[in-house]
Image (cartoon, grey):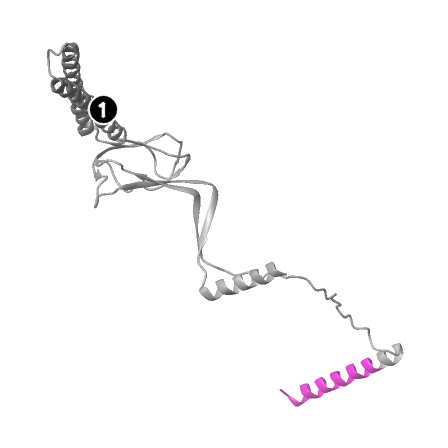
Amino acid sequence: MTTTFKNLLAIGLATSLVFGCDEEKETGKMPVQEITVVEVIQKDVPIYNEMVGQVYGLKDIPIRARVDGFLEKISFEEGSRVHKGQLLYNIDPEPFIAEVAAQESKVAESKTVMVNAKNELDRYAPLAEINAVSKSDLDAAQASYDASKSSVKAAEANLQQARIRLGYCSIKAPIYGLIGKTEAREGEYVGKEPNPVILNTVSRIDTVRVQFSISEAKYLEVARAYNKEKSQ
């Protein structure tokens, strides 16, 4: 910086000071400074805590294979909405159809035995009244008939179970909701570990729930604050 420039800068500063002093003398007072005023009030202020949580549907229903077999068909699009009762999966029904047929045969057989036992009882009953047969023969005929009736009921129950298992080959949506990614593909064997048992999940998402965890110290802090507020 040259000496001439320094001299000019000094003269400029001095001139500014002189004009400033003259202006203060003319007005007779300093300019008013603006001050911000804030009203102080007392109130409760919520304290927020940030926590990591996971969002779930109001209902998350797992779709299970209730019988084991080869997955024959998938009848939905992953990530789409499904309606209650909508067909989702088909498991090969042939083994279960055969089981139903076998149980139907056993029911027919047991009913035939029951009819024969009933005829035998009906034949012995009048003979026993005239002492043409012994009381023990009549009791044996009665016991045989009672046993045949129980056999018919057992066979019918087994048939009903076989029909139920056949019905499990068609897996349907239990609720209306959003279906996720399938855990098994067509042709896979499902329904028995280590093969997939839970094939998918249907979630109702019109209302959701959030699950999160907190530390023990934070839980105790919140519990104490809650109990204190409740006791007031």
Residue found 83% across the figure and 77% down from its top: 30
Residue found 71% across the figure and 84% down from its top: 9
In the image, residue 6 lies in the stretch drawn in magenta = yes
In the image, residue 193 lies in the stretch drawn in magenta = no
Among the 4 quarters of the image, the one containing residue 10: bottom right
Location of residue 35 in the rendering, given as x and y in whole percent from the top left corner: 76, 70
Q: Is residue 56 visible?
A: yes
Left/right placement of residue 93 relative to residue 220 reads: left
Residue range in magenta is 1-21
Which of the pair 154/36 is nearer the observer?
154
Neighbour tally class for label 1: few under 14, some 14-19, many 20 plus, Cα within 10 Å: some
Quadrant (top left/top right/bottom left/bottom right) for the C terminus: bottom right
**Residue position marked by numbered label 1 in the rendering:** 153
Q: Residue furthest bottom?
A: 3
Among the 4 quarters of the image, the one containing residue 60: top left
Location of residue 39 in the rendering, given as x and y in whole percent from the top left corner: 74, 65
Left/right placement of residue 47 relative to residue 8 reads: left
